[in-house]
Image: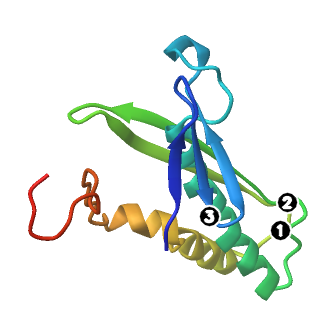
Amino acid sequence: MKLTAAYHGGTRYDITSGKHRVVTDQPVADGGQDAGMSPVELFVGSVASCVAYFVGQFCARHDIPRDSLSVDAEWTVAEGPHRVGRIDIAIYLSHRMTPEQKERLLKVAHGCTVHQSIAVAPTVAIKLNPHSHQAGTQP
């Protein structure tokens, strides 16, 4: 799987994946034009939307209406290193549920792919111009 984040002036970077595009930018207070969510907002939004998807699928499997389903996410920043330190997720669903259904729904929510990808941290390899030189030559 692959996507590309490309520079579009100022602090704006557009992410493309297949036929989809997401604009990221910084708030005006941070020197941007606020043309899109910041990368941190997008990151937290990825967690929230993944939880929403998994909960929605749970609801569909158990004939629970999901018309009112929404997920809020709040986060705080931590230092050493500078990062998102905590994400609080709130799931809103108007359908009444038994304690057993609530327990299973929360287990499903915790199992979302994005949440699991930060709970068990992925390896992130960062290289500069990895394919820009011929084999056997030095850049």
Mark 1, residue position: 96
Instruction: Give the Cα distance between marks 1 and 3.
Output: 19 Å
Pair 1/3: label in front = 3
Q: Nearer the viewer, residue 6 or 100?
A: 6
Q: Is residue 133 left or right of residue 63?
A: left
Label 3: how many residues lie within 10 Å, few (<14), some (14-19) or many (20+)? many
Label 3: state its secondary structure.
helix
Residue 22 placement (x, y as % from top left): 66, 48
Give how far apart the Cα atoms at labels 1 and 2 are.
Answer: 6 Å
Q: Are marks 1 and 2 in contact (CB under 8 Å)?
A: no
What's the residue at 68%, 29% (across, down)?
A: 35
> Mark 2, residues whose alpha carbon is within 10 Å: few (<14), some, or many (≥20)?
few
The type of colouring in the image is: rainbow
Q: Amino acid at mark 2?
A: Ser
Looking at the picture, tell me which residue is in the foreground, 1 or 30.
Answer: 1
Relative horizontal placement of residue 63, taking residue 20 as reference (left or right): right
Q: Position of residue 57 (x, y in %)?
A: 73, 78
Name the residue beneath numbered marker 3.
51
Q: Which numbered dot is residue 94?
A: 2
Q: Is tag 1's residue or tag 3's residue first in the polypeptide sequence?
A: 3
| Residue at (81% x, 60% y) in the render | 69
Q: Are marks 2 and 3 in contact (CB under 8 Å)?
A: no
Mark 3: which amino acid? Answer: Val
Give the left or right position of residue 53, taking residue 88 as reference: right
Other-residue count near label 1 (Cα within 10 Å), few / some / many at <14 / 14–19 / ≥20 = few
Q: How many marks?
A: 3
Residue 124 numbered mark, or none: none
Q: Is residue 65 left or right of residue 24?
A: right
